[in-house]
Image (tube, rainbow, N blue to C red):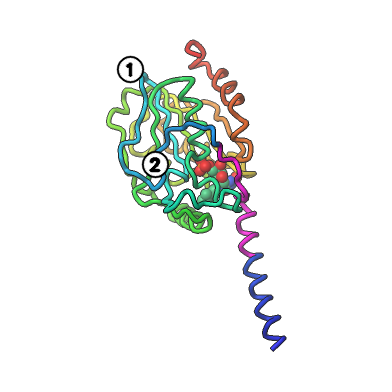
Amino acid sequence: MRNIFIKISAIFLAISLSACNRADSIDITSQSQISESSSVSSTSQGNDNSSNISGDDADSNILIAYFTWADNAHVEEPDKVDIDATTSASVLVPGNAAKIADWIHRETGGDLFSIIVTEPYSSDYNECLDRAADEKAKNARPQLAEHIDDMEKYDIVFLGFPNWWYTVPMAIHTFLEEYDFSGKTIIPFVTHGTGGLASTITDIKADLPKDVTLLDPIGVYRPEVDSSHDNVIEWLKTLDILKEDL
Ligand SMILES: Cc1cc2nc3c(=O)[nH]c(=O)nc-3n(C[C@H](O)[C@H](O)[C@H](O)COP(=O)(O)O)c2cc1C
């Protein structure tokens, strides 16, 4: 009897360790950076498919488009998500990319657009990881729920996303392939774990026409997102294209 108990305990331990190692390997562990003070007008939790383009500046030529897990996951009961749990925090709105999008928007005006897939990702971190890995392996193009009617009016497109499996979430490819970005200026902002920007910028470059101007991105390390507001503003000020306006 005792031997059986020891064997069962060993199996449980092995399963737990393997789960931990998997999460650690791409540094997607504890995320306690949810800000109560942030006022991002993000899409509602639960993947509401109502129009998600917002802005008060009809004549602006600036678009701030971003993908964030929190806008792309269905959370049944947000109040019950334990934000101290190892892997759950960033599933709550506003997501990291959404926070940075909001700061940019406050400085530059223009329109905000949350890139949302038709099939929400799981709010379970490991399940989300699995689907993202599968989509990357298949070079998938997840379908998007919302579209921009008048992309031609934008000359400057900020494009925000997290590093997912060392590259962009595959929905970013769907987004970039949907519109003609010829002649536009694209300014990426990336949130990430210890993996940094990895191949995100190289990979979006491959989607873009040659005459796109791709400006230097900002990368923000996940645990530093909430304290990075001033850095984001300083980065914006270095962008020649915005200097006259800021
Ligand atoms: C599916 C998935 C894959 C990830 N892969 C990586 C990775 O390869 N490298 C890394 O540094 N961070 C990785 N992360 C961590 C995210 O980049 C990080 O938590 C980011 O701040 C999330 O931004 P968001 O809240 O806007 O979605 C991953 C997160 C998820 C959900």
Q: Return the residue found at the far top.
A: 244
For image coordinates 52% across by 47% down, the residue present is 164
Q: Secondary structure at mark 1?
A: loop
- Left-right relation of 68 to 56: right
Residue type marked 1: Asp
Above-or-below relation of 73 to 216: below
Q: Is residue 213 above or below residue 28?
A: above
Measured as percent of width and height from the top left, residue 198 is found at: 58, 42
User: Is residue 31 shown in magenta?
Assistant: yes
> What residue sits 27% from the left and 31% below the top?
149
The first of marks 1 and 2 along the sequence is: 2
Q: Which residue is mark 1?
A: 59
- Give the percent coordinates (x, y) of residue 44: 39, 41
Residue 176 forms part of the magenta stretch? no
Secondary element under disc 2, as helix, strand or loop, is loop
Looking at this rendering, what residue extends furthest in the front direction? Answer: 79
Residue 44: give its label.
2
Occupied quadrant, residue 148: top left
Q: Are marks 1 and 2 in contact (CB under 8 Å)?
A: no
Q: Which residues are magenta?
A: 18-35
User: Which residue is painted at 64% across and 44% down in the image?
Assistant: 194
Residue situated in front as seen by the camera: 198 or 106: 106
Q: Which mark is residue 200?
A: none
For the N terminus, which image quadrant?
Answer: bottom right
Q: Position of residue 92 (x, y in %)?
A: 49, 45
| Residue at 50% over, 40% down | 95
| Residue 63 screen position, x and y as percent | 40, 26
Mark 1 against mark 2, which lies toward the viewer?
2
Q: Residue furthest bottom?
A: 1
Circle 2 Cα neighbour tier, 10 Å, few/some/many (<14 / 14–19 / ≥20)? some
Q: Looking at the picture, which amino acid does disc 2 mark? A: Ser
* Residue 224 visible in image: yes
